[in-house]
Image (cartoon, rainbow, N blue to C red):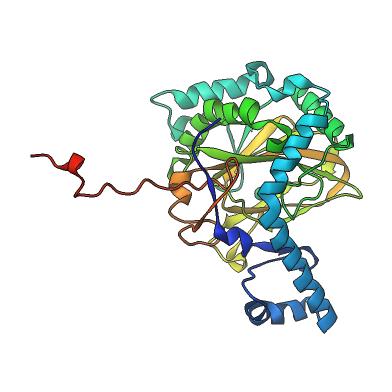
């Protein structure tokens, strides 16, 4: 396990709070600020009574409270899972090369070549209709099947479950289940980093040093779709694991800095065992599923070098708050050496 201390940005406790009812991401620093900034839009979207507004305020306070307790509760859940949960497929927790599609291994080998260039990408890296989005083969079918079976077994167990975010109610946080050290970190370091270095070197792809990984699940009577958003990541891998389903495609717009009014979206379908690679701050969402179940592995990969300069969630220099594990991928930069220290004096 890495010994680097990773941090959150303090904006985690104020910004990007999602109000499902209004499909709106908001910032909350005080009731007055909230009322001033969002009063009109909430009224327009149907929040017309004082009671309704008070209910929304309560929801926000609850979400902020949840975020403040998140790391502590995650530690407790992980310990509980270790104690009571009996895995069904123990082998899926430890990455083996045999889980990876042979074409993926070829892509990795190609990406590591000194003269690898974007002009002559292997055919198995498919450039999609949205700018700088790629589809690549990642896993074997057997691995995807066993991985889903393992997650279903977990879902049916008594073990406590942490959900990936406020937009997704049925996903699984993989670090709590124990996938980080033996599966996800080796996958990122040995296989995904070379590919991301080649495809996304200008946006942190060549300095990825942490991740947050989870599985999202969509089904009728559960979550069907996902609102338009960007990820708290520099580079994202989204692998379709199965099962059978119809619709539920992703759609991609523009980078987060571009206003929605100037954006045209492009639809991109899933191909089981394949992954989509995209810039984390490329806006996207998921269309409603119409039948079956869709399970996707999402790996938000982070570059501390990039995000230490600017937090993508608040667009400011991050204000660091200690966190557990990889937290949100920020690190404390070493202070610049002082010119006056003896050791620096060269005579
Ligand atoms: O539904 C999907 O496959 C996309 C999920 C996603 O974009 C996310 O969780 O950040
Ligand atoms: Fe996303």
Q: How many marks?
A: 0
Q: Position of residue 49 (x, y in %)?
A: 83, 83
Q: Is residue 266 above or below residue 270?
A: below
- Residue 42, by quadrant, is bottom right
- Residue 41, by quadrant, is bottom right
| Quadrant of the rendering where the C terminus is positioned | top left
Q: Position of residue 55 (x, y in %)?
A: 82, 73
Q: Residue at x 45, y 59 (%)?
A: 317
Is residue 19 something that shows in the picture?
yes
- Residue 326, by quadrant, is top right
Q: Which residue occupies the extreme left position in the image?
A: 347
Q: Residue at x 90, y 48 (%)?
A: 220
82 sits left or right of 112 in the view: right
| Quadrant of the rendering where the N terminus is positioned | top right
Is residue 203 something that shows in the picture?
no
Residue closest to the eye, 171 or 191: 171
Q: Residue at x 58, y 56 (%)?
A: 254
Q: Is residue 207 above or below residue 11?
A: above
Q: Which residue occupies the extreme front position in the image?
A: 342
Q: Which residue occupies the extreme right position in the image?
A: 221
Residue closest to the eye, 205 or 122: 205
Q: Position of residue 89 (x, y in %)?
A: 80, 22
Q: Position of residue 30 (x, y in %)?
A: 64, 75
């Amino acid at each position: 396990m890495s010994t680097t201390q990773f941090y959150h940005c303090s904006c985690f406790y104020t910004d990007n709070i999602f109000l499902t009812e209004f499909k709106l991401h908001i910032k909350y620093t005080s009731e007055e600020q909230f009322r001033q900034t969002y009063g009109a839009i909430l009224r327009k979207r149907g929040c017309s009574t004082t009671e309704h507004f008070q209910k929304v305020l309560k929801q926000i306070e609850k979400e902020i409270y949840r975020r403040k307790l998140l790391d502590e509760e995650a530690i407790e859940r992980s310990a509980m899972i270790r104690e009571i949960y009996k895995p069904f497929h123990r082998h899926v927790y430890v990455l083996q090369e045999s889980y990876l599609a042979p074409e993926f291994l070829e892509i990795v080998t190609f990406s590591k070549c000194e003269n690898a260039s974007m002009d002559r990408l292997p055919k198995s890296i498919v450039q999609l209709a949205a700018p700088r989005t790629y589809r690549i083969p990642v896993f074997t079918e057997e691995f995807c099947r066993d991985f889903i079976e393992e997650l279903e077994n977990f879902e049916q167990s008594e073990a406590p479950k942490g959900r990936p975010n406020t937009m997704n109610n049925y996903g699984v946080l993989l670090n709590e289940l124990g996938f980080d050290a033996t599966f996800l970190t080796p996958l990122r370091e040995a296989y995904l980093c070379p590919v991301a270095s080649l495809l996304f070197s200008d946006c942190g792809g060549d300095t990825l040093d942490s991740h947050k990984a989870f599985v999202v699940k969509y089904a009728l009577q559960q979550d069907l779709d996902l609102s338009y958003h960007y990820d708290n990541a520099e580079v994202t891998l989204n692998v379709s694991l199965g099962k059978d389903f119809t619709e539920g495609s992703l759609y991609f717009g523009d980078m987060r800095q571009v206003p929605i009014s100037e954006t045209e979206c492009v639809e991109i379908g899933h191909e089981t065992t394949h992954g989509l690679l995209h810039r984390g701050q490329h806006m996207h969402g998921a269309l409603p599923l119409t039948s079956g179940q869709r399970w996707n592995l999402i790996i938000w990969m982070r570059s501390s070098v990039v995000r230490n300069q600017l937090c993508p969630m608040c667009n400011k220099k991050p204000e660091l708050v200690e966190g557990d594990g990889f937290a949100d991928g920020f690190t404390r930069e070493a202070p610049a050496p002082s010119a006056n220290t003896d050791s620096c004096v060269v005579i």
